[in-house]
């Protein structure tokens, strides 16, 4: 019965399921492109407004020509007709100040009282995306299409995101406004060489207020809670976009108009919006401006300032891979603008011009210095060819001027054509190495009054570090005349490795022309110290130098260049007491000797890069290798972050490196960013750069790194003499954080092994001292009760802590090693694998255990001696030494000391830089909470161990001893053992491994106590305690006998009958028992204090 019921239900549900499965409201299974790829499921493809399109686009349809392309051509329309971040403006003025502006703008993202220039002008941006082409139902002259238009006003240059899942929407927030319009219409072509899109749209428009002078008053402070902009739905929107069918120098602009078909009195009416963009990468460029190029570049090569200023010495690229290199270093890349320092006219406005570009107030404010102004090359097209046996290439591009406030990335993605853009086309010829182009400002052929000459440099120098250099000059005179505008693309040393991999053809040979080595040599001679200590240091220490085991000279120089490269944080030198900014220092070696860049990895033999770099240094690899200690020419680039180092933020360096003492002596050049008038008053300027700078870099040695601070030092000074010289700056001295060379693992193991061996030696010495004390009290049983148990307890605690923590670490390692084989090893697994380190660690733990047991044995013997003394003298308990007062006095002293240290610690913290993190990371990369008081307590426990004799000194005073409870070798030996870590810390580097925390064998130098001053003060205090014990044991009774004779007689009387020394009842050991009333006067003549308490 049940089965029949289920069959009946299934029969009833089957038709319903079939209907549901076939229901496709969004036409997800439709074939929108006549066999093309399907579109997003939420794009409406129903063309329900065909009647509106036919009415509004009547003029466009009437002039349409017959469409002759197929479905494949239709499929390519979507990317070809879409554009991103074009420009738009209203009729009349460009700020939307007409009678009915389209969008409001909330300018409260910038304070009203902000300084001039801070409130930069917002950008009107427009993006269009063609989302659907109905190729299956196209007409004879038109094709149904749909799309999305995004219109925005943005302060930071971000445009509306265009994706497949959109709907009509309006957004406004401080600094940005976005409007998205859904469109549908037709695509047509006319006989005037245009492709036209005519579309009607639906949108939600912002409603204007009743005040005509301030219609957007509600848009202020749009970030307030529960803000809802007033909007109006409107479907009476018309968009017409006109595209050129052929992309050329003068026909690349896309024009559009967005209008409202409502009446002017309607609430949703807005003034006409004009759109301007350009065809993009999906359109084929047609070269055909030979006549314009020939006029602009005649004669060829054109003699601009680059060629006239020594272009033959620049090593211009003349190979077969020009197009590949041009694309790598110019396409959407940033080109810096050089100040007009050569301008010598009296026309101030002319020298302040940014070439032919129309500029805003931010560029004008630079006064011809162009600080922060850049040029971006877009839409670079390059076609290599051979013309009459000569290698050449045809090139087209768009040059866009970028003001200082605009981000270069967002500027590179803009497609608008206007006064800040130039379209260019030209020819590069290998015979001259010059790319000469004619350039047209904005739109059309009437503004083609500029010439662009561009070069690729392969030879660098101190003042020429640009891989790309170009100049824009005017063609003819008149109102379009402007002074030459130079731009360049500086090459960074790292790019010689990453961006010159495979150039797509002939390998690129680079060279460096050293022009400052003579000055650097003079700097070396007058700066290099010469004294006996320096000679000894040079003979004992080794610094980075060429390795003798390298395959060739090129590899050796490349390895050395890598050693000399620095990427590390730094601190001022000397270390300041107050708060300071920690800069980040980068020193990139550009060339070393005959090598430029780096040698190619050996894993890619035979690649063009490998061959090219080998060719760059072929002379060195085929000749006899130079001495490893010979002075090498070097060039580098130094960058330092931070506002305090703006004068030396970027320096081009050139000089010499001395591998004998690990020092670079360099001459630095910096780019001068100043108004054009200031250059005439500046002396000693070389190609617009200040090269009156000396830089000395000192590297740490590669040997004895566990003993010498492994930090590099950088000293920068200006050699300009006059105090009123505007280019002079104060000397800068920096010291980096610890650095590691390529053999960092061996260095870490070497340091830890050395410390481990020293730890073994010190523990062995401590065990010998304790064993000698044990033998001493066995043979001098009468002094045994006067050994402080508190002193022995402090030592026992010091030994027990590493045993407990070491056991936990050992169990953790065992658990890690017995886990899954696929588990990720800890960061320090390479160090943990060292067999030598494990052996030393095990020996250290065994010795610590032996010292701990010996200390416990001493405690046991002292404790038993006091118990026996109490049992033998029940009527005189006051005569038995007690550590109660010693413990109280010692604890009180340490509590007061800890409070003082804690207060001093927090006072010192106030003068340190603020730390954002309240945690630290251990050797395995695990984060732990950092509590200041706990860290200080841990530090003080280590200090208490160094002061281990303090309880004995207090006990000697309390008990008024007249004996020698501690053997001199015991307390002197343990004091020396405790002092050795501080001596070692004073002469060795404070930190070796900056990559992960290390377990210090001796002292953690990052703690407050273990500073340079602590390494002096703590040993002095420990020596003072040892001296006090020596004085107390040797001279205390004599002093008392001279000053308090009555008390002395009392002590002698009582002490003569209290104790006697008898052999132990156990013959197996040499313990003694203290018995009263027998053998008076025996026991080496030692007396006891009768007033013990």
Image (tube, rainbow, N blue to C red):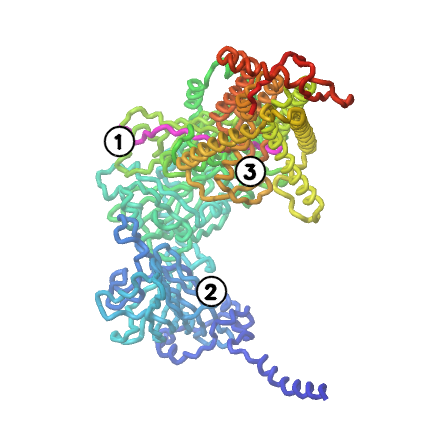
- SS for tag 2? loop
Identify the residue under disc 1.
Answer: 681
Label 1 Cα crowd, 10 Å radius (few <14 / some 14-19 / many 20+): few
Q: Quadrant of the C terminus?
A: top right
Q: Closest to the observer: 150 or 950?
A: 950
**First in residue order: circle 3 vs circle 2:** 2
Q: Closest to the observer: 484 or 171?
A: 171
Q: Closest to the observer: 243 or 1043?
A: 1043
Identify the residue under disc 2.
Answer: 163
Residue range (magenta): 724-745
Distance, label 3 to label 2, CA atoms, is 44 Å
The reply to whether residue 1065 is visible in this rendering is: yes
Label 2 Cα crowd, 10 Å radius (few <14 / some 14-19 / many 20+): few
Q: Measuring from the top left, give residue 883's x and y in whole percent.
A: 57, 28
Q: Is residue 925 magenta?
A: no
The label shown at residue 995 is 3
Distance, label 3 to label 1, CA atoms, is 49 Å
Q: Measuring from the top left, give residue 962's x and y in whole percent.
A: 58, 16
Q: Quadrant of residue 707?
A: top right
The label shown at residue 1048 is none
Name the front one of labels 3 and 2: 3
Q: Is residue 536 above or below residue 82?
A: above
Q: Measuring from the top left, give residue 476's x and y in whole percent.
A: 28, 46
């Amino acid at each position: 019965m049940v089965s029949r019921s289920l069959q009946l239900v299934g029969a009833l549900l089957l038709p319903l399921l079939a209907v549901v499965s076939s229901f496709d409201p969004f036409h997800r299974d439709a074939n929108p492109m006549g066999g093309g790829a399907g579109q997003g499921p939420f794009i409406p493809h129903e063309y329900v407004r065909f009647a509106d399109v036919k009415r509004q686009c009547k003029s466009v349809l009437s002039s349409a020509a017959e469409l002759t392309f197929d479905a494949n051509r239709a499929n390519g329309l979507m990317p070809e007709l879409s554009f991103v971040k074009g420009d738009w403006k209203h009729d009349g003025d460009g700020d939307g100040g007409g009678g009915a502006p389209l969008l409001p703008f909330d300018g409260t993202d910038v304070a009203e009282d902000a300084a001039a220039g801070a409130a930069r002008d917002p950008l009107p941006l427009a993006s269009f995306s063609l989302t659907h082409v109905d190729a299956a139902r196209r007409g004879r002259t038109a094709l149904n299409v749909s799309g999305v238009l995004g219109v925005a006003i943005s302060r930071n240059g971000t445009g509306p995101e265009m994706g497949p899942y959109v709907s009509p929407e309006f957004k406004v927030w401080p600094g940005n406004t976005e409007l998205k319009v859904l469109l549908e219409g037709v695509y047509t072509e006319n006989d005037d060489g245009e492709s036209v899109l005519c579309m009607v749209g639906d949108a939600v428009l912002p409603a204007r207020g009743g005040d005509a002078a301030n219609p957007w008053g509600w848009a202020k402070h749009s970030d307030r809670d529960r803000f809802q902009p007033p909007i109006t739905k409107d479907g009476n929107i018309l968009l017409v976009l006109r595209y050129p069918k052929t992309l050329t120098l003068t026909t690349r602009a896309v024009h559009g108009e967005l209008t409202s078909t409502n009446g002017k009195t309607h609430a949703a009416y807005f003034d006409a919006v004009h759109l301007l963009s350009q065809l993009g990468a999906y359109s084929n460029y047609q070269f055909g401006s030979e006549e314009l190029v020939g006029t602009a570049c005649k004669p060829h090569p054109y003699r601009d300032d680059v060629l006239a200023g020594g272009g033959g010495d620049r090593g211009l690229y003349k190979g077969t891979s020009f197009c590949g290199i041009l694309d790598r270093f110019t396409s959407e890349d940033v080109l810096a603008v050089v100040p007009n320092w050569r301008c010598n006219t009296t026309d101030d406005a002319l020298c302040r011009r940014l070439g032919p570009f129309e500029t805003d107030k931010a560029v004008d404010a630079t006064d011809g210095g162009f600080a922060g102004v850049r040029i971006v090359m877009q839409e670079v097209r390059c076609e290599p060819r051979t013309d009459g046996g000569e290698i050449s290439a045809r090139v087209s591009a768009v040059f866009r001027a970028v003001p200082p406030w605009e981000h270069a990335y967002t500027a590179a993605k803009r497609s608008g054509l206007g006064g800040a853009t130039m379209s260019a086309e030209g020819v590069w010829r290998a015979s001259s190495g010059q790319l000469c182009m004619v350039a047209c400002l904005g739109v059309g052929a009437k503004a083609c009054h500029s010439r662009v000459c561009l070069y690729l440099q392969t030879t660098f120098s101190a003042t020429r570090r640009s891989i790309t250099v170009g100049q824009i000059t005017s063609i003819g005179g008149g109102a379009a005349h402007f002074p030459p505008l130079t731009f360049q693309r500086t090459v960074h040393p790292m790019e010689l490795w990453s961006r010159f991999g495979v150039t797509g053809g002939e390998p690129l040979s680079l060279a460096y022309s050293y022009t400052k080595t003579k000055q650097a040599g003079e700097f070396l001679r007058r700066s290099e110290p010469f004294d006996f200590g320096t000679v000894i240091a040079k003979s004992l220490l080794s610094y980075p130098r060429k390795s003798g085991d390298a395959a060739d000279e090129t590899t050796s120089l490349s390895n050395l260049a890598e050693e000399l490269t620095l990427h590390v944080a730094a601190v001022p030198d000397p270390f300041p007491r107050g708060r300071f900014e920690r800069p980040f220092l980068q020193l990139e070696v550009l060339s070393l000797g005959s090598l430029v860049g780096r040698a190619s990895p050996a894993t890619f033999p035979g690649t063009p890069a490998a061959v090219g770099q080998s060719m760059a240094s072929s002379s060195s690899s085929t000749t006899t290798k130079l001495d490893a200690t010979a002075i090498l020419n070097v060039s580098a680039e130094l960058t330092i972050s931070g506002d305090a180092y703006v004068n030396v933020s970027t320096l081009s360096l050139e000089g010499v490196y001395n591998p004998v003492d690990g020092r670079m002596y360099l001459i630095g050049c910096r780019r001068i960013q100043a108004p054009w008038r200031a250059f005439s008053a500046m002396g000693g300027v070389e190609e617009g750069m200040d090269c009156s700078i000396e830089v000395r870099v000192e590297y740490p040695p590669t040997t004895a790194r566990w003993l010498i601070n492994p930090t590099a030092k950088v000293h920068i000074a200006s050699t300009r003499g006059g105090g009123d010289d505007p280019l002079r700056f104060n000397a800068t001295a920096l010291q980096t954080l610890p650095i590691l060379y390529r053999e960092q693992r061996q260095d870490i193991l070497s340091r830890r092994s050395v410390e481990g061996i020293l730890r073994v030696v010190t523990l062995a010495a401590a065990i010998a001292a304790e064993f000698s004390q044990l033998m001493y009290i066995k043979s001098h049983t009468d002094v045994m009760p006067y050994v402080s148990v508190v002193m022995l307890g402090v030592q026992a605690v010091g030994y027990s802590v590493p045993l407990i923590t070491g056991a936990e670490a050992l169990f953790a390692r065992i658990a890690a090693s017995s886990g899954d084989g696929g588990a990720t090893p800890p960061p320090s697994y390479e160090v943990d694998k060292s067999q030598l380190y494990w052996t030393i660690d095990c020996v250290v733990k065994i010795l610590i255990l032996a010292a701990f047991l010996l200390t416990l044995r001493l405690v046991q013997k002292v404790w038993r001696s006091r118990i026996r003394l109490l049992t033998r003298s029940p009527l005189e308990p006051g005569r038995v030494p007690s550590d109660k007062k010693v413990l109280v006095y010692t604890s009180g002293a340490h509590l007061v000391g800890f409070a003082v240290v804690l207060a001093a610690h927090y006072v010192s913290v106030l003068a340190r830089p603020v730390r954002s993190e309240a945690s630290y990371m251990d050797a395995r990369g695990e984060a732990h909470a950092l509590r200041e008081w706990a860290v200080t307590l841990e530090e003080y426990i280590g200090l208490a161990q160094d002061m281990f004799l303090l309880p004995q000194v207090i006990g000697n005073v309390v008990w008024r001893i007249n004996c020698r409870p501690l053997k001199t070798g015991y307390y002197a030996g343990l004091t020396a053992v405790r002092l050795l870590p501080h001596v070692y810390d004073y002469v060795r580097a404070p930190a070796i491994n900056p990559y992960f925390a290390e377990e210090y064998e001796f002292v953690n130098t990052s703690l407050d106590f273990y500073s340079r001053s602590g390494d002096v003060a703590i040993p002095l205090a420990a020596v003072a305690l040892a001296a006090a014990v020596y004085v107390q044991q040797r001279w205390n009774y004599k002093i008392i006998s001279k000053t308090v004779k009555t008390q002395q007689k009392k002590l002698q009387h009582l002490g003569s009958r209290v104790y006697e020394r008898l052999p132990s009842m156990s013959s197996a050991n040499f313990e003694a028992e203290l018995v009263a009333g027998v053998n008076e006067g025996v026991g080496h003549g030692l007396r006891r204090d009768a007033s013990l308490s």
